[in-house]
Image: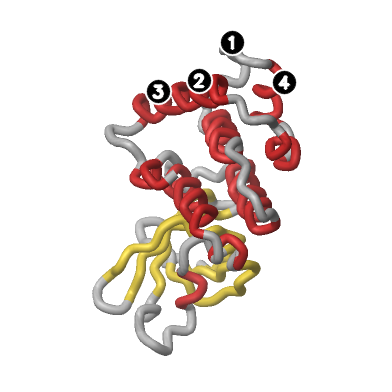
Amino acid sequence: MNFCDLAIVLKNTQLRENDRIVTVYTRFHGKLDIVFKSVRVSKGKLKALSELFVWGDYRLFHKNEQSIPICTGGEILSVFPSIRADIKKMFLVYYFCELMSRLTPSNQPNEEKYNLMLSALKELDSTSEISVWMRPAFTLRFMELAGSGFEETAVGIDSRIWKVLHSGSWAEVNSLEINDLTMNYIDELIRKYMGDHLNYKLKTEEFL
């Protein structure tokens, strides 16, 4: 079966000598592992489509339900050049990718998760400064979409900040004033969430 879907690359892993298994989050099929053949050779035509946090339109072949889809082609929609030129932005996106990859089941479509990731990438690519609220806002929104968030819980912080972090535009998130007490409280909530769902810390946390 051949099919196409829009997707964002979350992770890639070496497979044999020249191939890769690439984890993507798709718009209509959720998280998928995809085989990219011969992308580690110098003339690998699909190599660019297998790179981290590339956004593309992928053409896939799925032999049967037990097999991993194979990428047969596609088109890059963006490589987010501003992010790749800024090490702080890259580390933040690595965190987003690891969060999505580790805490999202495969083959369970959720277009809202796809839209969250894409909107965050577009925002980071278009801004010169990273708001300190970007990471907690993304994480809190992801937690809600994963079904175990705190949006409806009275957590004892400014309700306006809480609402903006969960449902405000990225421009509103970026305009929030820094509040160390609130930030530390939210970080503790996030650490509790991670502790309940993972047996270890996300590898990217130490770089943020």
Residue type marked 4: Arg
Work out whether residue 147 or residue 177 is closer to the camera in this orientation and state it: 177
Q: Nearer the viewer, residue 41 or 129?
A: 129
Q: CA distance from mark 4 to mark 2?
A: 15 Å
Sequence order check: which comes first, mark 4 or mark 3?
4
Please name whichever residue, 34 or 56, is drawn nearer the observer in this view of the structure.
56
Judged by depth in the image, the label closer to the viewer, 2 or 3, is 2
Residue with the mark numbered 1: 156
The reply to whether callout 1 and callout 4 are in contact (CB within 8 Å) is: no
Q: Is residue 184 above or below residue 100?
A: above
Residue at image mark 3? 192
Q: Are marks 4 and 2 in contact (CB under 8 Å)?
A: no
Image location (x, y in percent) of residue 31: 48, 50
Q: Amino acid at mark 1?
A: Gly
Look at 58% across and 38% down and name the residue there: 132
Disc 2 residue type? Answer: Tyr
Q: Secondary structure at mark 3?
A: helix
Label 4 – label 3 distance at C-alpha: 23 Å
Coloration of the structure image: secondary structure
Q: Amino acid at mark 3?
A: Lys
- Sort mark 3 into few (<14), some (14-19) or many (20+) by Cα contacts within 10 Å: few
Q: Measured from the top left, where is residue 76 in percent x and y?
A: 60, 72
